[in-house]
Image (spheres, coloured by chain):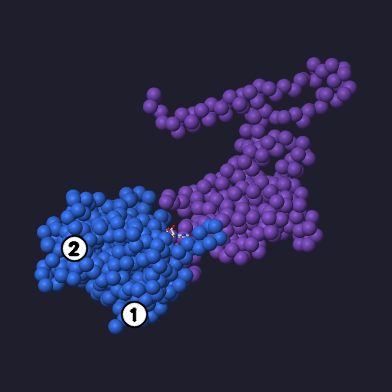
Amino acid sequence: MKTLSENRKAALLSILILIVSCLIWEASIPAQKAVGELTEYELLTGGGQPKAGVPPPSQVLAKAWEQLSNPFYDAGPNDKGIGIQIGYSIYRVLTGYLLAAAIAIPLGFLIGMSSVAYKALNPFIQVLRPISPLAWMPLALFVIQDSEMSAIFVIFICSIWPMLINTAFGVAGVREDWVNVARTHELSALKTAFTVILPAAAPTIVTGMRISIGIAWLVIVAAEMLVGGTGIGYYVWNEWNNLDLTSVIFSILMIGVVGMLLDSLFGLLQRTVAYTE
Amino acid sequence: MTKPFLSIEHLTQRYPDGQGGAFTVFENASFGIDKGEFVCILGHSGCGKSTIMNILAGLAEPTGGVVKMDGMHVSGPSLDRGVVFQNYSLLPWLSALKNVTFGVSARFPSWGKARVIEHSTAFLAKVGLTGDAIHRKPSQLSGGMRQRVSIARAFANEPKLLLLDEPFGALDALTRGTIQDELIKVWSDTDQTVFMITHDIDEAILLADRILLMTNGPMAQVAESVEITIPRPRVRNDIVEHPNYYAIRNHLVHFLAQRSAELSGQAQTPDQQPKPVRIDMTEDADSEDPEPATPILRAVEG
Ligand SMILES: Nc1ncnc2c1ncn2[C@@H]1O[C@H](COP(=O)(O)OP(=O)(O)OP(=O)(O)O)[C@@H](O)[C@H]1O
Ligand SMILES: [Mg+2]
């Protein structure tokens, strides 16, 4: 036992922390008093109503079990399984994100290769980048006239900047020696771009993609709260309106889990393109 | 005068000196290299050897002057001019083998994949890299191994002109010897021309037909062209016995130790070529040797 690996130790500790904090959480929720024990005052002020208090973890767990055992049920517009809601959110995130990548990466290449293009586009990037993606929402709704497309547009606009800037930065930073290798081998511009510049800049580009997907996932929740209809953000808001805090907590956890999965996917990609000089 | 294979005419390179002025690395450097010749260039650090090589490779534009190969202006790099860079310049995301196949498939686009790999593996083997080492990334190789991959990449492309910037700098004496032999073999089997920068006088004498000597910068000149009058094939341990060996060596040492500094900074006349120097102690009659071996210097380097 004394030769537990570091990872094992860390995993055990994580589980311990989880259990302890759940126990503390569970213990700190005051039990609802039975009606007979209520004072007159409490009765008058409505204290006897089932209170919308923070639910204990046992309830959240039960909710999770219930939801995850049938994640794809669809019982009308306001009652869909968590799987369907998350599916909608992922679909929006990926559509907006892929559109952004399709523009940001080639444009970033151009900016990175040509200092004229960099200087010409830099002021626009600097002004547009700090705008909160949700600030675009009213304009998007007005111009696009479609809430679904507006949500996708907001994802597009928030995920484009990190990818654009990182691609430009990565491409501009490719060591001249490596470009010289391509030049002495008379590679065409296109071949140089794909066989030298792309792999050389890939770690920086993928870092940008990873930042972008993280931001996109943050923004989709807020965007769906605004546009409504479907999606995990709408689900959270809807359950809040139903005062179903158990579902709110459960969906918050799900948002975290999906975000982590998306991030680790890019972590994997990052590892495959990494190189040491 | 017949035009040599490679002719460097009035080459001038200036860089801004950071204070608004210009700093001249060399001015009006002119020399020629014949087809199939093996030429080494010796000079102190910073005199502009790599700068000349980058211009010959077509990677840098000189401030003035031209380089002609086969009568054609050199503008931009070409597969006919292979380069071994001073800092290896391997692509770090590719394995050693892929770094070589990268070059080979660019050079011989019609070859199939198997042939490219076979050719590349053969050249890696020539520089002593075999087995699983060739599948490792440059970061997992030692400095000397990286240098050998870089050499294999250039050799495998069989360029007309091979430009080597201190190709053996990071190698131990034994590996250096093997690869020098390999270089000579590759060179004598083909009609390749080699232009090599080195800091090692003995290496230059062993390999070169002719050694160009550069004075110190700034305003460096290619001052002399010393013919190596030792017949080939030259064997490392035997050439020291040759009567010309120490005479040539002393001349070179004397130049680098003293005259490179004395001559430095003198502007060159536009049509000046490096002064040809021929030292041959085996021909008694031919005693136009301007600088006989000096005993004082023999003591210095001994
Ligand atoms: N891009 C540049 N800008 C300004 N100065 C430069 C540049 N490249 C080289 N130099 C200068 O030109 C001179 C010659 O440099 P070069 O690299 O050719 O030297 P070298 O003879 O190859 O030296 P070493 O033997 O140390 O490799 C140096 O003084 C260097 O500072
Ligand atoms: Mg150099």
For marks 2 and 1 on the same chain, the one whose residue lies earlier in the sequence: 1
Residue shown at 66%/21% (left/top)? A27
Answer above or below: position of B16 versus A8: below
The answer to whether A86 appears left or right of A17 in the picture is: right
Task: Kindly identify the amino acid type of the residue bearing the numbered disc 2.
Answer: Pro
Residue B231 or A113: which is nearer the viewer? Answer: B231
> Ligand 1, what quadrant?
bottom left
Instruction: Using the image, name the chain to which the residue with label 1 belongs.
Output: B
Say which residue label 2 marks.
Answer: B292
Towards the viewer: A7 or A37: A7
Amino acid found under the numbered disc labelled 1: Asp
Q: Which chain is blue?
A: B
**Mark 1 neighbour class, 10 Å CA radius: few under 14, some 14 to 19, many 20 or more:** few
- Residue B247's spot in the image, x, y percent? 17, 61
Q: Which residue is mark 1?
A: B70
Secondary structure under the numbered disc 1 in the rendered image:
loop
